[in-house]
Image (spheres, grey):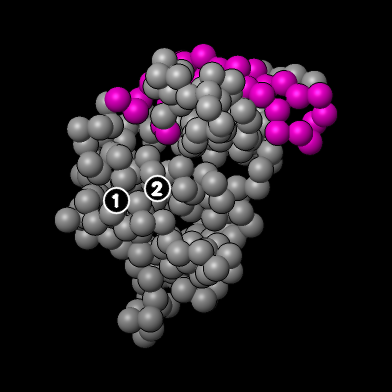
Amino acid sequence: MQWRDEGFVIGARRHGETSALIELMTRAHGRHLGLVRGGASKSIRVALQPGNDVDAVWRARLPDQLGVFVVEPVRTRAAALIDHGHALHGVGHLCALLRLLPERDPHPEICEMARAIADVLVVKERAPALLAHFEIALLSALGFGLDLETCALTGARDDLVYVSPKSGRAVSREAGSPWRAKLLAFPAFLRGEPCASTPSGEELAAAFRLTGHFLRRDVFDPRGAPMPHARELYVKAVTA
């Protein structure tokens, strides 16, 4: 069997003397692994750097086999990230998040979000806010979506400034005031409200505390895995 799709490179490692085992996030076929013959060569290895886009043809005799990829570069972003430490941490974190998705389970919206973020990772004024939104979208894709549309206590839709760390539901300013010390801040830029300027370091830190709480509790801890070190480095770099 055979299919063709555009893939976002999550990772690649040498396999044998001349080949590489690569991991792609594709729009129609989800997170997918495959062997690239000759992938250890310098010319092909450049295209297989995390954060790049490739045109990929996958072939296998049976659908459950590892299969073989034939790839061609489409968009090579990796070279532009080298001189930007925060962007390198960002692509590492982005790829670590994509690896959480079940293999071969299509998530076209997540795939498109990842590629859009990768396009602007070097731009500190844009990428961090997009990555915080991406973490919320990923939680939803994994079955741990947050309920951020109405207040958990009153049903109100306005002035939602907190999130319950237990239920993952939004809480309004008035209703949450008595318990504000125990609630997570819900920054305006995450609420989809118009912002007069780029989120501040404090607002970004609050957003990543919010998403990090649920990622750790619902995703990483049950798997017995630590939070990605790249995430810690990225958050530190963009909130300082």
What is the three-letter code of the residue carrying label 2?
His
Tell me the SS state at disc 2. helix
Is residue 3 found inside the magenta-colored segment of the image? Answer: no
The residue lying at 34 percent from left, 28 percent from top is 78
Count neighbours of disc 2 (C-alpha within 10 A) and say few if under 14, some if 14 to 19, many if 20 or more.
Answer: many
Task: Determine the image quadrant of residue 224.
Answer: bottom right
Count neighbours of disc 1 (C-alpha within 10 A) and say few if under 14, some if 14 to 19, many if 20 or more.
Answer: many
Tell me the SS state at disc 1. helix
The reply to whether residue 152 is visible in this rendering is no
Q: Quadrant of the N terminus?
A: top right
The reply to whether residue 14 is visible in this rendering is yes
The residue where tag 1 is placed is 234
Residue 176: x, y in percent?
A: 40, 77
The residue lying at 54 percent from left, 39 percent from top is 110
What range is drawn magenta here?
50-79
Rounded to the nearest angstrom, the CA distance separating label 2 from label 1 is: 8 Å
Is residue 72 found inside the magenta-colored segment of the image? Answer: yes
Disc with the residue nearer the chain's start (2 vs 1): 2
Disc number at residue 93? 2
In the image, farthest residue toward the left? 240
